[in-house]
Image (tube, helix red, strand yellow):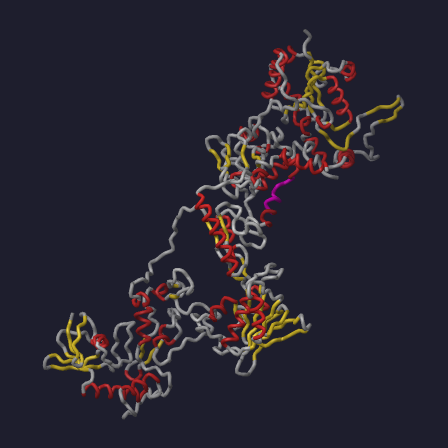
Amino acid sequence: MAKPKLALYWAASCGGCEVAVLDIEVKILDVAAFFDIIFWPCATDFKYKDVEAMPDKSITLCLFNGSIRNSENEKLAKLLRAKSVVLVAFGSCAHEGCIPALANLTTKEEIFKTVYLDTVSTYNPEKRFPQPITKIKEGEIEIPVFYERVKALDQVVDVDYYIPGCPPQSTQVAAVIEAVIDILQNGKPLPPKGTILGAGDKTCCDECPRTREEKKIKHFYRPHEIFADPNKCLLDQGIICLGPATRSGCGALCVKANVPCRGCYGAPPNVHDQGAKMMSAISSVIDAQDPAEIDKIIQEIVDPVGTFYRFSLAHSTLKGANL
Amino acid sequence: MITLKIDGIEVQVPEETTVLKAAEKVGVWIPTMCHNDLFEPYAVCRLCSVEVVRGKRSRVVTACNYPVSEGIEVLTDSENIRWIRKFLMELILSRWPNVKVVKEMAEKLNVGKPRYESLEKDEAEDACILCGQCVNVCREVVQANVIGFSYRGIKREVVLPLGEQSDKCIVCGACALVCPTGHIKMVIEDYKGKKPEFTLGPKTSIYVPTMQGIPRVPVIDAESCIHFKTGGCEVCAKVCEPHAVNYDMKDEIVEIDVGQILLSTGYDIFDASKMTQFGYGRLNDVYSSLEFEMMLSSMGPTSGKVLTKDGKEPRSIGIVHCVGSRDTNHHPYCSRVCCMYALKFAHLVCDRTDAEIYQFYIDMRAFGKGYEEFYVRILDEGVKVIRGKVAEVSEVTSSGEYKNQLIIRCEDTLAGKILEVPVDMVILCNAIEPRKDIDAVRRLFSISKSPDGFFLERHPKLDPTSTMSDGIYIAGCAQGPKDIPDTVAQASSAAARILSYISKGEVEIDPVRAWIDDKYCAGCRICNNLCPYTAIDFIEEKKISQINDVLCKGCGTCVAACPASAITGKGFSDAQIVAELEGLLAI
């Protein structure tokens, strides 16, 4: 029997997800032994045309990380969708937009202006911007078109499963791969479409070892402004921790390191908009009656969008700033 | 018991009784001028001198402080005694010939023009006759020890320490009360830079708050009671025959288990001094409605007479409606009762004085049964009603008998004229406002308040007596300004509701409840503090929160706040709401 085929692709993301795959350590050997890795630009030398040449549905499993920032990302997303039986949005960028999607707070024009003109290290006296097609002596060269908005993978193509996290925890990745191998080897049924793999059903609080009290917040602190008590709930101490509105699965990694949860595992089940839910929760526990005092407390939250939608802006109800 | 004879009448009295008291018992009159039951006999006027005969011996003693003894015979009207009394009375009369009590006593004792001429003759009508009652009452009863005697013989006089107003004086007025000649007077004056405060309150420190109150028992005002200032007095305890006065009673907290609660915590009146244009608290004779009500009370400080601060009957009175109510700067609502009590004031003032009465109103709201008829009756009584909001009350000084005159400035919106109405007294119809502690109370009972600040009813039309908290009912002005008939109706309705539950014995609850899905709750505890009905508990063992079905009212606060969406409102789940929206949008 021919080996199942595995493809891995890296769209608009930092590369951390690729490292997370490798981070499963010796299990990568099992992967290599069980699967026939037919496409993994980061690790092996394949060309897009090799993939294009494959028949549809010939790839058993495709782990797609990164969001859809430009036309190349979109093209590959559509290509891999067509060629794959199971397409998995791997990591927060593919899952719900992640950090790249924070660019949705501004415009393509502004981004280009910053990147190609305004930064101190840029020297661009002719004010040239990247053009999709450039004519040169030898003919035309083409680069991908930069889109106005960043999208999550499932906003471009149909996605079968999701593995959340920025990046997904290696233990979770290993567990998912083991499960996939088990399913393929033993002919077990696949989980229902849309299932979030490698994560729990509760929130980060479930895995958090800290003691929680009834919440009454008088001040918000940024992590560097306070010596946080390592045993008490960070939110109780006024440090905005997205744990209550974040799916469990990471093992409360950040909070165990005295750093508040930033929400990379995305919204828990039943929650449609992680940021809105967290804002709703936090606004409920501000301990003040006087509107002026409430206003003052709220002003202590620096960069609310970046705080509450750090990972989920592309998937949020608003999808970005309404510019 | 001791048996003795007074003027031939045999009498039995307990030991330690004085001759004066024994004589009182058998109805034998002995004249006194310095005696007062409030304190120990002082025996300084000597008028109570009597002859005590024991066997063959006889001596003259003062009856007020001479204790009875077995077998004595007291003569109060012997030749000797009559001579002594006449002599003493002549001495007193010669010194203070014009004092009323002295003249009356002289008349009683048949003493005419005295044979002597006093070196220290004082012809004042309110001269001090050195009876010492003020000194004794201050020392023994009040225990402030402020007043004392100074000098001796004919130079003797009643003085304050070093002749100056003393810090120790608690201004109780006991000295003025006992002074038989009126020499000591209570004067309201600026004292140490403090403006004298003139408020109309109860006349005494122990008083019955209202004759309609149940139980109708007196209360002590510890702020003004002498006993609570100096530890002395206790006069009320001494005169109370059943010994019911108890100074040691303290506020106590009593816990009672109840199933239902009716809140009728009442209201406060708007502090009119916030509206400086009316001069309340700054100008004399500008009164709040409750102060004027106190003045009209027959139990009040003026015994129901309408008097200005100078004690004169006012020639004209202005009644200002809507002070703080129907005013966007203060309370936008109508206080509802003011129009009618203002008309009642006018009616009572008409009845008791000849004063001209002006009502300054915005709209006359005589809405209840018989109210419009009362309004018409007031108009017939000659009360002048002026439609217009008062702009200002100011004070003018005149040289006439009425030194201070108030001027009310206002626009008569019906006549289209600016008026300046001179009055002697202004009565402000203060708005009814929520009690100062209403927020603490409503949090205690987990109920809401409406935008006007009063307790919020479950439904303004269909359920005005109950609240969103089951078992908590509201009645009266705690729910909103209302008059007595409305309050009685609302309270009766609430009582009936309460009784219906008591007789039923069980309670039905609405199916709309929130519930927490254990599968999704991670115990972040965000919801724990939010429940206005305290229905959410944190289960320490399971590390999750739980909702008490009986306490929950399905308000949805926790549903919105739950960051994990582990809480669902039964009947209002996200899926249901989205489906409803889709249905609406499909139309």
Compare residues B422 and B151 and report the one nearer the observer. B422
Which residue is rendered at x = 53% and y = 80% of the image? B402
In reply to whether residue A299 is colored magenta, the answer given is: yes
Which residue is rendered at x = 62% and y = 44% of the image? A299
Chain part drawn in magenta: A296-303
Residue B193 seen anywhere in this rendered image of the structure: no
**Rendering quarter of residue B117:** bottom left
Residue B540: x percent and y percent?
Answer: 46, 33
**Rendering quarter of residue A123:** top right
Residue B361: x percent and y percent?
Answer: 61, 68
Image quadrant in which the C terminus of chain B is located: top right
Image quadrant in which the N terminus of chain B is located: bottom left
**Rendering quarter of residue A176:** top right
Q: Is residue B480 left or right of residue B161?
A: right
Compare residues B49 and B255 and report the one nearer the observer. B255
Which residue is rendered at x = 52% and y = 83% of the image? B401
Residue A253: x percent and y percent?
Answer: 56, 27
Q: Is residue B514 left or right of residue A133?
A: left
In reply to whether residue B3 is colored magenta, the answer given is: no
Residue B546 seen anywhere in this rendered image of the structure: yes
Question: Looking at the picture, does residue A30 appear above or below residue B403?
Answer: above
Compare residues B282 and A69 and report the one nearer the observer. B282
Q: Is residue B202 left or right of residue A37?
A: left
Residue B463: x percent and y percent?
Answer: 55, 50
Q: Is residue B188 left or right of residue B393?
A: left
Question: Looking at the picture, does residue B393 appear above or below residue B434?
Answer: below
Q: How many marks?
A: 0
Q: Residue furthest right?
A: A137
Q: Residue furthest top?
A: A1
Compare residues B166 and B89 and report the one nearer the observer. B89
Question: Looking at the picture, does residue B481 appear above or below residue B58?
Answer: above
